[in-house]
Image (spheres, helix red, strand yellow):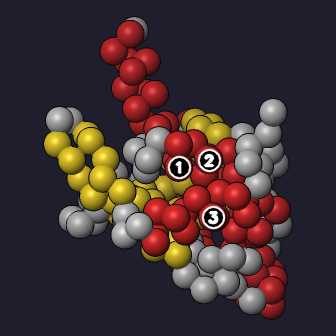
Amino acid sequence: MGSPSIDTLFRALQRVRQQGGISVLSGGAADWYEVMLFPAAPENEILRAMQTLGRRLPDDFLRFWLQSNGANLYVNESGLHGVGIASTDLILELHREEAELYGPGELAHYAVFARVNGSGDFLVFDLETGRVLDAVHAERPHEWRPIAESFGAWLARLIEAEGRYFWLEALYDADAEG
């Protein structure tokens, strides 16, 4: 069974935004996470971003941009938690920054689309498979781990986890078991 449609996921994010956020228990304390959505990206901006990147981005991500040109998802007051989804302009900046660090050749099959607040890491698309990878700065691209089969699957799990970094929680759980 596939993940819910981007339209359905976007409506869920809109509900959280309209409620003013969501209270999430973490480590015995409550934290308030907010969702910030932005106006839709015009199709010509989306095309320009892909042309400048020289990459075709996953269709479900492009559908998200048609509803919100970037987003700040589950950001807390301190700014140390949340995921910043890139806009059509910011995706170009993120790619340039990471290409300077890793070298453009190492990112040939990836597109950086989000920053993970508090960790300094980012999320990328594996453009050959469409999967979302956890791009840890301390690792090389070939070491990055898949965390979802698609942008839609990643977004669905993030919403289900109420903004918690489900991919890191799974990693810590696996380390505790091993």
Q: Is residue 98 above or below residue 1?
A: below
Question: Which badge, 1 or 3, comes first in the chain's sequence?
Answer: 3
Quarter placement of the N terminus:
top right
Name the residue that disc number 3 marks: 11
Name the residue that disc number 1 marks: 159
Mark 1 in CB contact with mark 3 (< 8 angstroms) = no
Q: Amino acid at mark 1?
A: Ile
Q: Nearer the viewer, residue 48 or 151?
A: 151
For discs 3 and 2, the disc positioned in front in the rendered view? 3
Residue at left offset 30%, top offset 53%: 23
Question: Which badge, 3 or 2, comes first in the chain's sequence?
Answer: 3
Residue at left offset 43%, top offset 50%: 163
Q: Position of residue 62 (x, y in %)?
A: 76, 69
Q: Position of residue 176 (x, y in %)?
A: 33, 15
User: What is the CA distance from the residue labelled 3 to the residue labelled 2?
Assistant: 12 Å
Residue 116 seen: yes
Residue 85 seen: no
Name the residue that disc number 2 marks: 156
For discs 1 and 3, the disc positioned in front in the rendered view? 3
